[in-house]
Amino acid sequence: MPALENLQPAPKSKVMVYLPYYKTNNQRSALPLAIGLYETGNLEGERQIEGGKNIPFVATWTVSSLPADPTRCRLQFDGNADLSYETTMANYEFINHLIDLLIFYKKNRCIDFSKGFYHQLLDVDE
């Protein structure tokens, strides 16, 4: 699995297809790397647990080329098949979660999804 430091940004032609879905400068500046990460189809990270030990996870997802296509994402925690969760969302939505992950990683040096992603994954109403 690729390290985030070695991630290759997506070419401008792919970025332009997704650009209309993202409004803020932070989102738009992280978009090329987020698409590059999306195209790898997988990621290893750690769910941060406040006051506890981080839980490692492996995320895998389907890759497609159009923003509105569905992406099926699966997370398995701690190498345990009983701790596997799956959700489906539009590509542009999932890439937005990858943007959040990249911004969080840049600040904290920890690979983890946002609370919003986990709410969607676990089907929790906010």
Image (tube, rainbow, N blue to C red):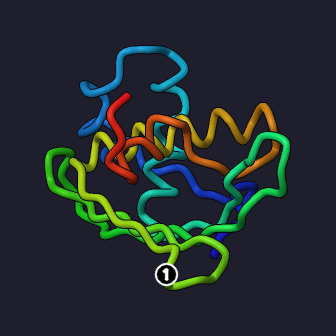
| Tag count | 1
User: The C terminus appears in which quarter of the rendering?
Assistant: top left
Residue 66: where, in percent of width, then height?
18, 52
Q: Name the residue under label 1.
A: 82
Q: In this view, does 27 lie above or below 79?
A: above
Which residue is pictured at 31% across the width and 70% down the height? 62
In this rendering, position of residue 54 left or right of residue 57: right
From this viewpoint, which residue is outermost toward the left? 68
Instruction: Decide if residue 4 is on the left or right side of residue 123.
Output: right
Using the image as rendered, state which of residue 15 and residue 110 is in the foreground: 110
> Residue 61 or 66: which is nearer the viewer?
61
Q: Where is residue 55 in the image (x, y as percent from the top left)?
A: 72, 63
- As shown in the figure, which amino acid type bears the numbered disc 1? Asp
Viewport quadrant of the N terminus: bottom right
Q: Which residue lies furthest to the top in this view?
A: 24
- Measured as percent of width and height from the top left, residue 64 is found at 24, 63
Q: Which residue is drawn at 40% across and 69% down?
A: 74
Q: Which image quadrant is residue 97 in?
A: top left
Residue 124 in the image, given as x and y percentages of width and height: 36, 41
Q: SS class of the residue under badge 1?
A: helix
Q: Which residue is drawn at 28% across and 64% down?
A: 72
Characterize the local packing of mark 1: few (<14), some (14-19) or many (20 or more) Cα atoms within 10 angstroms: few
Side of 57 relative to 117 (left or right): right
For the residue pair 39 and 14, the one nearer the viewer reads as 39
